Each structure stands twice: as structure tokens, then as C-alpha cells.
Amino acid sequence: MSRDVLIIEDERAIREELADFLCEEGFSCVLAATGRDGIARADERDFEAVLLDIRLPDMTGIEVLEHLRKLTPESHILIMTAHPSVSTVVSALRLGAVDYVTKPLILEELLQKIRRLIEFREQQMEIQWYRHQLQSEYDFANIVGKSARMKEVYHLVERIAATDSPILISGESGTGKELIAGAIHHGGSRKSGRFVPLNCAAIPAPLLESQMFGHVKGAFTGADSRVDGLFNAANGGTLLLDEIGDLPLELQPKLLRAVEQQSFLPVGATKPVSVDTRIIASTNSDLQQAVKDGRFRADLYYRLAIVTIDIPPLRDRVEDIPLLVQRFIAKLNAKLRKKFRGVTNDALRRLLRYAWPGNVRELQNVIERAMILEDGDLITSASLPSCLLERTHSDRAVGHLKDVVREFEHEYINRILQATSGDKQLAAELLGVSVSSIYRRLQTIEDEIGERGDEHAKPNAEQEP
């Protein structure tokens, strides 16, 4: 971080004294004796802080300040004056000065002000950087998929992002529910507020109420100070209640009140706290069944599920796998300092036919593992885990070997065609056959399956009177 300071002061003795003192404290100083000279220096570079005398020979400090705010808006400007008047100070502060000091200057006091301002600027820049990183992570563009079901999800996300209504996101573990929730937050009017995720299954039940709603000092043993809780932390933003199905039954009425009234009682408090927090809940369980079983309150379910988004498992959108693989490779190249270009055809075949019980999260882990193990610039089958290399089909019905092979071949060709959006040339390359061979095999298989179907239908037809 730069520690450059611009000193605009017409009195040479003061200007040089300030420069000598600040240089000894590790700052780099640029000096200007007039307002125009100071403006010219600010036009050349950015400064952490500017010390500006209010009275200059060619311009007033207020006039210089107006120019500086345009040239170096990130700089902290301190006004120096020997005759402070309320009107002058107020005008300077309104125009963007952050503070003022009076002459004769107390150098140690001035140093503390400059250090505090620079520290504040560094904190603000760090916050902005983290916000940018967070927004990049949850950006809508990171939701990958061209399948029909994912297009439905995109449409819903775009429609509801600008609203404040509660949303319930359902889907298996690893499907990207938090990513969808983050995209809703960062795509709406609350994006300047915080996005706060809370996993209801990860926190022991006795501590969960305090984590959600906070507590006052002395509320229980060990409560040595007041804690605001995550509902308060997300005030003005969004609170994601992940795995809401694991929320203890005794906490559900309190959550219902917080969602409906936007107020709650911290643990041990007697006065309610009001917030403006949007609620998004997510679950990998069947909440409707939980309501029937008495494990989840019906009124809370209907309050949270005003809009429901169902995220499909990866096995039901196999055509998205090649896109996801490329996205993960691009993302992990930066993290792992690699230069992978993609995957081999054989590796892609194995990725396409795997069932992915861990969904998108499992796919990302597999890609990262492979990129760590590989020495080249392509992911090969050799770097894939053993579960992707097995070719067992125990769930397939028992039948003649020829019939089973034919049915699997038909199913597999169709899956590859689906994954390539009907591009038969690309499908042929992945399968290692010619385009004409794909047409011929599909036609032959369909004819054989049709013949078998007719044979199975004949006995039933003969039994009809």
C-alpha cells in the first residue's frame, strides 16, 4: 500500500518541517507551494492523504479542494488553517475534506490523524475486495448449464431476485443451492448488504438459537458479552438458512415470528429487535413429508415456500457436464497454477456415464484431484477415481447378453447425443466411430428393440377373444 502524502502549503518553513517529519515516519512526501501546483501534482498520481492549507497565494483552499475531489477522489484531504471559522470548516467538510487541523500544528497529533485515515482507507479497500470476491463467487454467470431444467432455474432466479419474498431452494447435497441463493442476493436490490449463510445442521441445537438471534450478557453460563446473532448481521441483506429441515422443532415458532414480523427476542432479552432481513431457506430433504410426519411446522413451511426452486441433480442434466468441466478447469487453473486445456475423449465418456451421487460438488472435486495428479495439460482417465472407472450395471434387468448390450449401447449413444446438443460429428468423435455408424447403429438397435417388443406383445394379442 502506498504511503504518499501531498502537502500544499505556501509557507516554506511549515512545508519543509511537515515533509521532514513525515518522511522520518516512513511517508513519501510531494510538496506544492501554490494551489495550481498542488492540482498539477494530484493530476499526475494518487495520494493516500493530502494536507491542504486553506489560504494560498493563487487560489482558496476551497477551490483547490473542489479540483482535488475530482482528480483524486480516494485521497483523504485534511484542511490546515490558522484561523478556523465554522463556515469555512463546514464548507470544506461538505466538499469532501475528512478533517481539519489548526496552526500552529502539533505534529504528533497530525501523524495520528493521518495514520487513522490511511488505516481506514486500507480497511475500506479490503472490504471492497472481499465484497468483489464474494460477488464474483456468487455471480449469476457462475451458474453453469444449458439443460432445459437449468434454464427454468435461471428464469426463476431472474424473476425473484428483485423481490424480498422468502424463497425455498430444494435439491440434493452438492447441487449448488448456496450458489443459487447467492446469485439471488447479488442480483437484487440487497446486493450492497451482507449475504450470510447459516447451516442449521452444523450447529448443536442448544447453540443454534443464540447463533440465529443473538443473546444478551448473562443470558446463560458463559455469555460474558452481548452477541447480536446472524439475523442482525444480515440486516439489510440476506440470511440463508441452509438445511432448514434440521431446524429443531422448538425453534420453528421463533423463526416463523421473525420471518413474518421482522423482529425477534435475543436469548435472555425482554425487548424485541427489529431487522430488515430477507430469508432464503434451502434443504436436501422432503419438507412436505416432514410436515406430514410432524417434524416441521406447516405454517413455517408455507411461509418459507412462497417461491420454491428445485435444483435438478447432475445425473438428470448430463448435457451440462462438459460445460461444468470447462468452468472448473478455468477456475482451478488459476488456483493450482496450471494450464490445462480440457479432458480426453475417454475421460469425458467416463464423466458422462457416472451417476454423480455428490452432484456438482463431487464433479469439481474429481476435476481438482485429476489436475493435481496429471503432469500434462489434459485430464485423462488414469487420473480419475476408481468409482468412475468401474463399468457395473447391477441395476439393469437380467436378460440375454445381446439384448442387454444393445439396450445399453442405445442408451449410451443417446446420452452422448444429448450431452453434445445433437451434434452428431462431436458425438462420433467422443464415441470413436463415424457419423454414419451412429445412424446405422441407432437404426439397427431400434429395429431390434421394436421386434422384441412385437414378440412380447403377441401372446397378449392371442389371448384376446
Image (cartoon, helix red, strand yellow):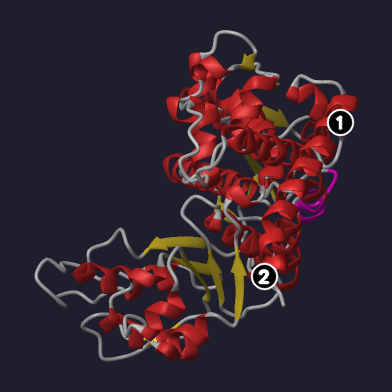
Contact, mark 1 vs mark 2 (Cβ under 8 Å): no
User: Measured along the vertical axis of the image, is residue 441 above or below residue 184?
Assistant: above
Q: Secondary structure at mark 2?
A: helix
Q: Give the residue at mark 1.
A: 440
Label 1: few (<14), some (14–19) or many (≥20) C-alpha neighbours in 10 Å: few
Q: Which residue corresponds to the image point at 71% horizontal and 48% vertical from the top-left? A: 452
The answer to whether residue 96 shows anywhere in this view is no
Q: Quadrant of the N terminus?
A: top right
Q: What span is colored magenta in the figure?
A: 58-66
Does the stretch in magenta take in 62? yes
Counting from the top left corner in percent of width and height, residue 12 is at 67, 31
* Of residues 186 and 324, the one drawn nearer to the viewer in this rendering: 324
Residue 436: % across, % down = 90, 26
Nearer to me, 62 or 131:
131
Q: Up-down: is 399 above or below 233?
A: above
Q: Is residue 420 magenta?
A: no
Q: Is residue 167 above or below residue 396?
A: below
Three-letter residue code for mark 1:
Arg
Query: Residue 423 vs residue 162: left or right?
Result: right
- Please name which of the two marks, 1 or 2, marks the residue nearer to the observer: 2
In terms of depth relative to the viewer, which is nearer, 206 or 46?
206
Q: Position of residue 198 (x, y in %)?
A: 40, 62
Query: Looking at the picture, which amino acid does disc 2 mark?
Result: Gln
Q: Is residue 62 left or right of residue 234?
A: right
Q: How many residues crowd mark 2 within 10 Å: few (<14), some (14–19), many (20+)?
A: few
Q: Tell me if 445 is positioned left or right of 185 in this view.
A: right
Q: Which structural element holds mark 1?
A: helix
What residue would you read off at disc 2? 463
Q: Main secondary structure of the magenta part?
A: helix
Is residue 22 left or right of 37 when viewed as pictured? left
